[in-house]
Amino acid sequence: MAQQQKQSEPIKIPDFQLEFRDFVNSFNEKVKTLQSSFNTFTTLTTGVLVLGFLILVFALATMLIQSWQLTSTFQTESNQLKIQGDVINNDVTVQKSMLDSQAKIEKNLQDIKNLLQK
């Protein structure tokens, strides 16, 4: 009777194709999860790099604008200083002319006074 029970039980043969399909399916799911994580990481990294590049571009633009303003201000003030220097030189020239004229007038008055006293 023991032999009949042993004979009546079916022999189980492992289904390697089914196990292999299960392994491949689980492997594909893990790869898809890894790809999704990698895509997220790549997108995040790309976003950070683009944001950093934009910040650098705006910083460079700001520096160029400030440099232009500084140069413009320097040139304007330099021109004003030149104009003020020219005005001062003209004033000095006019004052020297006035002193010369006053000296001539005093000399002429002195000559007239001397003529009148004779």
Image (cartoon, grey):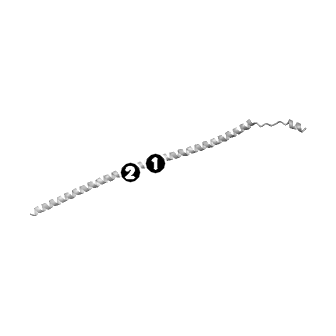
Return the disc, 2 or 1, that comes first in the chain's sequence: 1
Residue appearing at x 72%, y 37% in the figure: 20
Report x, y in % for residue 110.
14, 62
Residue appearing at x 26%, y 55% in the figure: 91
Report x, y in % for residue 44.
58, 45
Q: Quadrant of residue 28?
A: top right
Residue appearing at x 16%, y 60% in the figure: 107
Q: Disc 2 on helix, strand or loop?
A: helix
| Amino acid residing under circle 1 | Thr
Report x, y in % for residue 52.
52, 47
Q: Disc 1 on helix, strand or loop?
A: helix
Relative depth, front residue between 93 and 62? 62
| Amino acid residing under circle 2 | Thr
Residue appearing at x 46%, y 47% in the figure: 60
Instruction: Specify whether 58 is left or right of 104.
Output: right
Relative depth, front residue between 71 and 53? 53
Crowd class of label 2 (few under 14; some 14 to 19; many from 20; radius 10 Å): few
Q: Quadrant of residue 109?
A: bottom left
Report x, y in % for residue 76.
36, 50
The residue under label 1 is 62
Residue 41 vertical position relative to residue 7 in the rendered view, above or below: below
Instruction: Specify whether 41 is left or right of 97.
Output: right
For the N terminus, give its image quadrant: top right
Crowd class of label 1 (few under 14; some 14 to 19; many from 20; radius 10 Å): few
As drawn, the residue found furthest toward the left would be 118
The residue under label 2 is 73
**Numbered label tally:** 2
Instruction: Specify whether 75 is left or right of 114.
Output: right
Cα–Cα gap, marks 2 and 1: 16 Å
